[in-house]
Image (cartoon, rainbow, N blue to C red):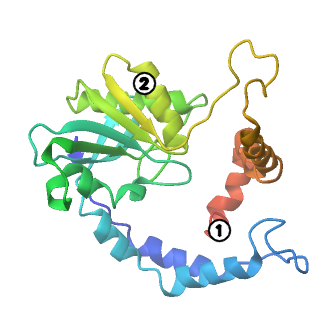
Amino acid sequence: MERFRIHVPDSVLEDLQVRLSRARFPDQLEDAGWSHGTELDYLRELIRYWRERYDWREQERALNRFDHYRTRIGELDLCFIHQRSPEPAAFPLVITHGWPGSVFEFHKIIGPLTDPVAHGGKREDAFHVVCPSMPGYGFSEAPRKPGFGIRQVAETNAALMAALGYTRYGAQGGDWGAIATAEIARVDREHVAGIHMNMLTAAPPAGAASPMDGVAPDELPWLADMASFRKHETGYQQIQRTKPQTLGYALNDSPGGPAP
């Protein structure tokens, strides 16, 4: 394992500025709002903020307050935060981010988790926190072979915790990190003491005659909202799941592509 410090070369930041200045925006139907996707004026303002006001070096300094490392897990170089608590009895906890997120999601909670006393808490609530960048995210290496899914993310996290010497630990995650957290409880059940997820998915009970069996009447509107969301708001999932390479050319070429 080696220490890792985030520092993006100036040439990369300069290239970003050039690409943002040359962003080409599509037309938009009159009064379309957000009905066809990201609203045009909103994205123009976002790109303007990115070019003129966003300070990446400030974000680097904020992230580099934490202890970053890089190590080899299987065939991949994995980057992660390993923030040990000053409390010797602290419990290990691996936290997994979601899509399209990063370990930046946790910059406000790492301090209270590792040093609760300094934040008005109790020393017995302290954790040694491990925040991996999932393979292909942040500064972690992306898999080069097909078949690397969320189960493999969980296996990678379990291998990392073992490499750090943790034989008993907890796991937490949201979004895709929640799915990875559920999986780590399956693939490393001998070492995982418990899990916490802030996104839950559930299937109908086994043997149910229909998906609505046992659903309380006051919960039906929630399911209707979810059905509407899946119908109208998940187009990105279809292309990313079936033809990610096709989409990748545009996203990689222009920083304005991932921005929406």
Left or right: 8 with respect to 83? right
* Image x and y of residue 15, in percent: 52, 75
Crowd tier of the residue under label 1, counting other residues whose Cα lies within 10 Å: few below 14, some 14–19, many 20 or above: some
Left or right: 135 with respect to 246? left
Kind of residue at disc 2: Ala
Answer yes or no: do the residues labelled 2 and 1 have beta carbons within 8 Å?
A: no
* Image x and y of residue 251, in percent: 66, 60
For disc 1, the marked residue is: 254
Labelled disc at residue 185? 2
Q: Element type at marker 1?
A: loop
Q: Nearer the viewer, residue 206 or 20?
A: 206
Residue 43 figure quarter: bottom right
* Image x and y of residue 89, in percent: 11, 37
Q: Residue at x 14, y 55 (%)?
A: 117
Left or right: 32 with respect to 59? right
Q: Nearer the viewer, residue 88 or 119?
A: 119
Most extreme residue toward the right is: 30
Residue 78 figure quarter: top left
Q: Earlier in the sequence, mark 2 or mark 1?
A: 2
Labelled disc at residue 174? none
Q: Is residue 8 visible?
A: yes
Kind of residue at disc 1: Ser
Task: Judge whether 166 appears above or below 114 on screen.
Answer: above
How far is disc 2 from disc 1 in space, using C-alphas?
A: 38 Å
Q: Residue at x 24, y 57 (%)?
A: 111
Residue 18 figure quarter: bottom right
